[in-house]
Image: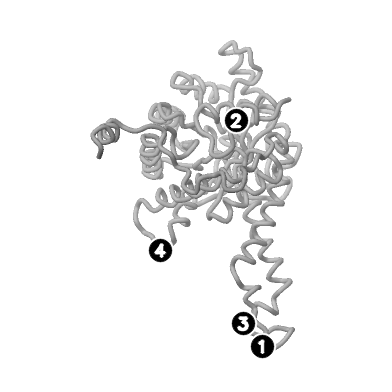
Amino acid sequence: MMTANETIPAGVVTGDALLKLLSHAKDNGYAIPAFNCTSSSTCNAAMEAAKKFNSPVMIQVSNGGGKFIAGKTCTDPNAAAAGSVAMALHVRAMAPYYGVPVVLHSDHCAKKLLPWFDAMLTADQAYFDQYGEPLFSSHMLDLSEEPDEDNIAICVEYFKKMEPMKIWLEMEIGITGGEEDGVNNEDIDPEKLYTTPQQVYAVYEALSKVGDMFSIAAAFGNVHGVYKPGNVTLQPERLGKHQEYTKNKIDSVSAKPIFLVMHGGSGSTEEEIKTAVVNGVVKMNIDTDTQWAYWDGLRAFEAANRDCLQGQIGNPNGADKPNKKFYDPRVWVRKAEESMVERIKQAMERLGCVDKYTAVVPEPGSVPIWNFTPKSKGAVELLKGAIGL
């Protein structure tokens, strides 16, 4: 198996490069982890891990994450979108330095959050008009709480808007249980946690008429959050039945014609993850476990240095000794990042994506500080240039 380096560039990948990346994952039996990030620090930790373990990576932002990045006191109705765009611009500025493919994604968007989705598409279009590609690589619509017909119809309408910019669409059919980012499905009917092959095919049939850059999050008992073993009944083998059903319907030469996504991956067993990947899962969301890992790095640092964190001056080494090297945020935030990187390693190993893309870090000084270069000039700019303005 050749590595993805042969056909896919490093940095933020969109359009045809993204399709090649996810096809490489599906064809070679691995999945790419998608980490919910809420700061430049967590974004950097995800990219650091990808570089360290030679893997592609997905960085995603939720509506709540976007609001947090914007600042908790920013009450503008577009705060979530502005924060999401800010995170995307940070990743776009820094991704080239890490030497691996990075997928920029927005996470669950329920019907009530469609204004957030619309605002991000506006940013995508503006970026596309200037640079020839969208700001984000992909977006997710989660209309799983709506009737299937409405869910699919709305996804089709949005996909028609996204396809000209070659933005990947992820959609969900069937409901992921548990609670995350303000969406609570803890009391949902258990039967709704398992999507049927017919539901998946209905999505495939509708979206494939628009384009091929889409993936389906089909529920197989998934639950957001982390729970004690035995409290969640995952059935990833159901995904193979979805693939078989659609393959037969479309007479596909591929045994796995659908790009599938796994939500609620935190706390899943290694065998459950492996079964999901074997059956065509190319992306797995991870949030709860990396949240804990990030905190755990800080927790351990505070526990080990508690006596030096009680005041600016004075510690066991002397009443006049300064403590700046302990309370400087760059010190304890770094410990959180290091802990998160190690937890990401575990996820990458389980998903089989370690060493699937050899990190190629650019030569020092070779990446422009402002690496946003317009792909082409519009008619007005060309006219200005022609007349010397």
Which sits earlier in the primary sequence, circle 4 or circle 2? 2
The quadrant the N terminus occupies is top right
- Expressed as whole percent of the image width and height from the top left, the position of residue 373 reads 43, 39
| Image coordinates for residue 73, horizontal then vertical, percent | 40, 63
Residue 378 appears in view = yes
- Alpha carbon distance from label 1 to label 4: 38 Å
Q: Do the residues labelled 3 and 4 touch (CB within 8 Å)?
A: no
Marks 3, 4: nearer the viewer: 3
Q: What residue type is labelled 3?
A: Gly
Left-right relation of 45 to 167 = right
Q: Earlier in the sequence, mark 3 or mark 4?
A: 4
Q: In this view, does 340 lie above or below 277?
A: below
Whether residues under marks 2 and 3 lie with C-beta atoms below 8 angstroms apart, the answer is no
Q: Which percent across, then down, holds residue 124? A: 40, 38
Residue kind at label 2, given as amino acid type: Ile
Closer to the chain start, of discs 2 and 1, is: 2
Q: Which disc is residue 320 wearing?
A: 1
Residue 103 lies, with reference to residue 6, above or below; the image says below
Residue corresponding to mark 4 = 73
Q: Is residue 304 above or below residue 99?
A: below
Q: How far apart are marks 3 and 4 (CA)?
A: 28 Å
Between the residue at mark 4 and the residue at mark 2, the CA separation in whole angstroms equals 40 Å
Amino acid type, residue under disc 4 in the picture:
Thr
SS for tag 2? loop
User: Which residue, given by chain and number where applicable, does mark 2 sit on?
Assistant: 8
Name the disc covering residue 311, or none. 3
